Amino acid sequence: MTDQPSEAAPESVVNALYFGTKTLHVEAERSGVISDLLRGEASRDGYILLHRNLLTAYQALERGLEHHRATPSLKALAQYRLERSAALEADLVALCGGSFAGIPILPEGERYAQRIDACADGDGARLIAHAYTRYLGDLNGGQILKRLLMKKPGLRAAELSFYDFPDAPDLTALKTDYRNALDQAGTLVADPQAVIDEGRLAFQLNIELSWAVQNALLPEAAK
């Protein structure tokens, strides 16, 4: 979930990503387990499997951004410590009652993480698209999802720390600041269109993962 920007700032990479991925964003929200989450119909097992697979993507994104902390086009993002992996791991431990090593990483989850790793090659500019998709999405829609998940499947706060940003007393301000940092990064890349294209691919990878998680939970998948 991301805020709708004004049409009036074509130089903004956030605006360009929003409008360039709008159709895929809608498709993602209607796909597989993500649709279940947004309708308040998610199962505990579905949530666990999705986030086990997203963990590898977040780890890849964090590796890439850390590698490029001194890269001019990504330096603006370095001051924002939005890493989600530690919280996601803690949630998975709480959800699974201990180790989550037995939760499978699906081929679609592997492809998603591998793509983010590949984006760290060279100048790393395509990482901007994944930071937009993941972090700005978390800041925008995370609190809504948290409330839905506490209702059904009835997850506890200790299982939902992924959606908390304890070091940010003002999430609205953080969201605005991070949007601005993404835009600043976008002005420094050599090929802005490549970032938009990567944003489309990021949504497509999310859609594929969402359907894969839902399909893995079908009774037929266990046979």
Image: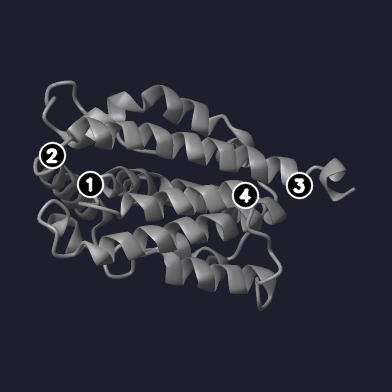
Q: Position of residue 82 (x, y in %)?
A: 31, 62
Residue on which the image places disc 4: 107
Specify whether residue 41 is in view: no
Residue at image mark 1: 125
Q: Is residue 75 left or right of residue 86?
A: left
Tell me the residue at 34%/63% (across/down). 62
What's the distance in space between the residues labelled 4 and 2, CA to CA? 32 Å
| Label 2 Cα neighbours within 10 Å, binned few <14 / some 14-19 / many ≥20 | few
Q: Could you say where residue 195 lies in the image, as x and y percent from the top left?
A: 26, 37
Mark earlier in primary sequence (2, 1): 1
Q: Nearer the viewer, residue 203 or 201?
A: 201
Position of the N terminus, as image quadrant, is: top left
Give the vertical position of 21 relative to 84 (above or below). Answer: above
Q: Secondary structure at mark 1?
A: loop
Q: Mark 3 belongs to which amino acid?
A: Leu
Q: Earlier in the sequence, mark 4 or mark 2?
A: 4
